[in-house]
Amino acid sequence: MIEPKLVEQVTGWRRHLHAHPELSGEEIKTAAFVSGQLTSLGIPHETGIGNHGIVATLHRPGSNRSIGLRADMDALPIKEANGFQHASRNPGVMHACGHDGHTAALLGAAAVLLKDDSWTGTINLVFQPAEENGKGAKAMIADGLFERYPMEKLFAWHNWPGLPVGQVAVHTRPSMAAGGDWRVELKGLAGHAAAPHLTRDPINAAAHLIVALNNIVSRNIDPLETVALTVSMIQGGTVTNQIPETATVMGTLRTFDAAIRKAVIQRMSEVIEGTAAAWGVKAEYEINSTGRVMADTPAEAALSVAAAEAAGLAVTRDIRPAMGGDDFAFLVEGKAGAYVLIGNGRVVEDGKLHNERYEFNDDVLAPAMSWLTTVAKMALRE
C-alpha cells in the first residue's frame, strides 16, 4: 500500500513536470528536477548519461543480483489546449504522452524502495531522455550504461488510455512495432501560378506521391500482415500566386516483421522515384529503418503478471499490439525484460495519447508505483 502522503507528493512532482515540459534532447531542467528530488531522498545517482540521462542506484547487501526500472522524461512539440493550472508553460511543448507521470512514478517507487528492507541486491533507476525521437536509449547505451550499471533484467511501463485505471496489461506477443520516420523532398521549377506550364510543380507531384504511398500497403502487402505507412506532414509554398521550387512530404513507417519492412521500403523507393520522374521533378529522400520491435521475454512477462497480482492490481493479457514504438526495445535487446501498460482510464475523443488535450491521470500513480516496487523485488528474488 502506497502511503497517501507520498502519493500527494508524487502528484505534485508530476504536475510540476507537466507544467515544464522539454523536447527530446533538451531535458536540462527536467533532469535537474529529477536529480534534485533524488538528492533530497538521499539516493546516489549519476547525471549526464547519454546527454541528459540519469541513473540512480539503490543497493542492499546480501545479493549480487541487479535489475533496472526505466522511465522516459521527454515531451512533444505540441501546443497544449488544456486550461488547468499545471498546463504547459513552454509554448509549443507538451507532455502529451504521459512521460511526466512515468518519471514521477519512478521517483515515487525510489522513495518506497529506499525505506523497504525486504529486498537485497541492486536496483538501477533509469531516467531516460529522448524517447520520442528514438535516440535516448541508444545514447545511454553508447555512453556505457550497461558497463557502468550491469542489469540482468529491465522493466518499464506506459500509461494507456482506454484501460481501466490501474489495470496492468501484459502482452502475449510483441507489444510495440519497429518505427522509423521518412522524408521526401521534391524539387521542381518555380514560377508564376498563372503560368503553370512554365513550371515543374512539386506540389502536384507531392499530391500524387501521397496517393501512391497510401496504396503501397493495400496493394503490395499481404492483408494478414500488419503495417502502418502514414503521411503525417507536408510542407511547400509561401504565397498563393507562386508555384514553389520545393515541396516536402514526411511520415512514419511501423512494422512488426523485418522482411515486410524491407519490402515496403523497396516499394516506397520505387514509388518515390517513379512519381518524381512522371512529374518532371527531382526527389531526394531518406527512409529511417532503425526502429526495433518491443517484445517481452516470456519469463519476465509472467513475472510482470505475478507482480501486478501480488500488488493487488487487476491484470489482463487480452491486449492487442500497438503500432506505436518505444526505444525501450533497444535497452532490452539481448536482455531479459518486459514492458507493460497500466490503464489511464476511460478514453474520450480528445484524451488520447499525442492529443493537445491529453492529460495523465494522477490516479494511476499509486498503482504504477506499486507495480514498479513489486516487480523489482520479485525480480531480485527470482
Image (tube, helix red, strand yellow):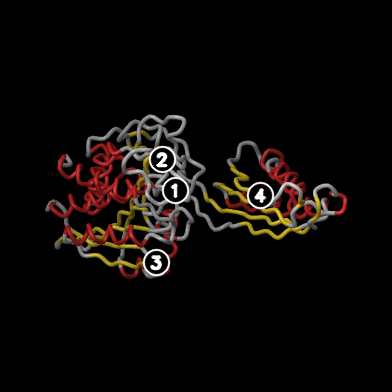
Q: Which mark is residue 357?
A: none
Mark 1: which secondary structure? loop
Query: First in sequence: mark 1 or mark 4?
Result: 4
**112 to 284, vertically: above or below:** above
Name which residue lies at 69% across and 57% down: 185
Query: First in sequence: mark 4 or mark 2?
Result: 2
Crowd rating for badge 2 (residues with CA inside 10 Å; few <14, some 14–19, many 20+): many
Residue underneath mark 2:
171
| Residue 343 locus on image (x, y percent) | 35, 36
287 or 90: which is nearer to us?
90
5 left or right of 77?
Answer: left
Residue underneath mark 3:
51
Query: First in sequence: mark 2 or mark 3?
Result: 3
254 or 100: which is nearer to us?
100
- The image quadrant where one finds the N terminus is top left
| Residue 113 locus on image (x, y percent) | 18, 52
Name which residue lies at 33% across and 57% down: 30
Kindly identify the amino acid type of the residue bearing the numbered disc 3. Answer: Asn
